[in-house]
Image (cartoon, coloured by chain):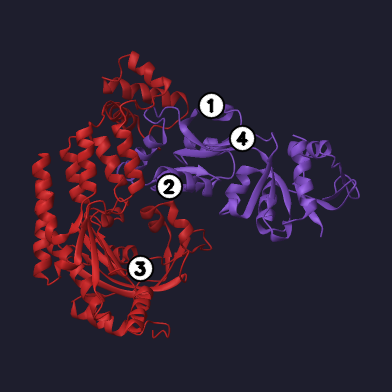
Amino acid sequence: MPLINLPAFAGDLLADFERLKTLRVDTPVIQPAEPFLDMAGEDLRRRIFMTESETGESLCLRPEFTIPVCLRHIETATGTPQRYAYLGEVFRQRREGPNEFYQAGIEDLGDPDTAMADARAIGDAMLVLANRLPGERLTVTLGDQSVFEAVIAACGLPAGWQKRLIHAFGDQKQLERLLAELADQRSPGVFGPEVERVAILGMLEDEERLVAHIGKTMKATGYSTNASRSPRDIARRLKEKVELAATRLDKATLALMREFLALDLPLTDASAALHAFAGKAQLELGDALALFDARVAALAEVGADPGLIRYRAAFGRPLDYYTGLVFEIVVEGTPAVLAGGGRFDRLLTLLGAREHIPAVGFSLWLDRIEQAIAASGRAK
Amino acid sequence: MTITIALPSKGRMKDEASAIFERAGMKITAVGNDRSYRGRVEGWDGVEIAFLSASEIAREIGSGAVDFGVTGEDLVREGLADADARVEFSARLGFGHADVVVAVPEVWYDVDTMADLGDVAADFRARHGRRLAIATKYWRLTQQFFSGSHGIQLYRIVESLGATEGAPASGSADIIVDITSTGSTLKANHLKILSDGVILRSEACLVRARKASHDGNAVVDRIVAAVRGAL
């Protein structure tokens, strides 16, 4: 379908995608809204265009491609590995810029070689951007949630705190708030009067008795024990919460975490810096650092210029299906993100895939690229 | 220019609002008969009264169709994006008190704060195959509070237009965001308010639409001064 508002470079971009051995796919513009709201949360509701079918099904105009491409992959039961490419219009309510614009990108599903697939996503994004913007210097910011996860695990925090911090990773304000709370020696956690009662009855140490007690209370108060959280869920989390309340970060560990989160340096120095940090702090970061190093090596292999890449330890996305690598690409010295990508190993199972399918990809903001091309032309 | 004040069309809100205006020296009389939806203020030419439902009032102030309105702060903040930029809360009137709160089943012994709820929400999908469901009619306030103030994004809103407190027991949602004045309905449904779960302490307010034509308008200033003086 030739659309006259397509960016002029769309044809060249698609030719690039084909040379990169991807399978071009299209997805309907009108999509069921549920998967988007389920994956990204209710906040998305204000930023997408929703409507309802005659039968009451929530529908929306495609706000992005990753979820539709993955759903299509699951529905058509296509085998892996598989590399998809897409180019089409997406629709979002934006404060700045038009509400409909083009995105293109690549989703790489099912490649078990994590480091190589990560490197290829970054390399491909850099390549197609460089082809559109010859003579402009691109810079890539790279983050890695798995390194953060390894650091907090190595610090010996209880599971509940690790989950909290991982969940907040990428949301700098929330992360700061949690660290401050963790370090606050006076913050004992809030417990209701019922908890005191079950503690006095000695049930906190006896999971089976506590589960039975909660189950009985639920039935007596008219709550079904299986419609929502089960008595065992509540009993287990209560134990976790008692642990959470009892854990305070000592000053040294807090300083260590802050030091880690402040890391922001060229990728060429990042491996050495992370190893030095782990050594000095006596933290065992084994697998996460091995993957990090392997990714750096793979980047060299795919021909990505490591001199253009910076590692920022605090860079992440606070969505639960992002699991490792995240990256963004800009023209050096400008704020507009032209490409964003990352690894989302949990997304396909969340969307209903039967087996675990590792996945990594990126998307390009074609309207911003058009503006960057125009600005680049003006500057010359 | 005529200044229009929208007042609640029935019930206690109407009576209490009328009483305050009378104390303020602005006695309101209905035009025509008692059930008329238009009124005037004795001795105040150029001011007219429109009797509307409380939620309509919030919308009409937001669009600038009326100049002033008496309605609950909760309805204004729920109904309008960017409420403070579009309207001014000129006076808090001291009646119609109600809190918009986050309430969870009492039996959730492990949940007493928003942080606890954040932990539960983060794990919910993995354990139950769906997101945490919140029954509410307050979409906007819920979103602002959960993601804006507490970094909680992974939940789904189940719209509920009545008997929201019953949703957790009936299994149609896990928790609720609702309005409460005495807390007795929550208690009767075995729900508890989180210790940091008060989203808004609402009451009836005199609300003014921010309009350029109000600048330097003596009648507008006199209305605000009169109502404030009567409190």
Q: Which residue is mark 1?
A: B187
| Residues behind callouts 2 and 1 on a single chain | yes
Q: Disc 3 is attached to a residue of which chain?
A: A
Q: In the image, residue B185 lies at what x, y percent?
A: 58, 29
Q: Residues within 10 Å of mark 1 (few under 14, many from 20)?
A: some
Q: Which residue is mark 2?
A: B147
Q: Disc 2 is attached to a residue of which chain?
A: B
Q: Which residue is mark 3?
A: A336
Q: Disc 1 is attached to a residue of which chain?
A: B
Q: Which chain is red?
A: A
Q: Which residue is mark 4?
A: B98
The residue at the point 55 percent across, 26 percent down is B188
| Residues behind callouts 4 and 1 on a single chain | yes
The residue at the point 27 percent across, 23 percent down is A207
Colour of chain B in the image: purple
Q: Which mark lies nearer to you, 1 or 3?
A: 3
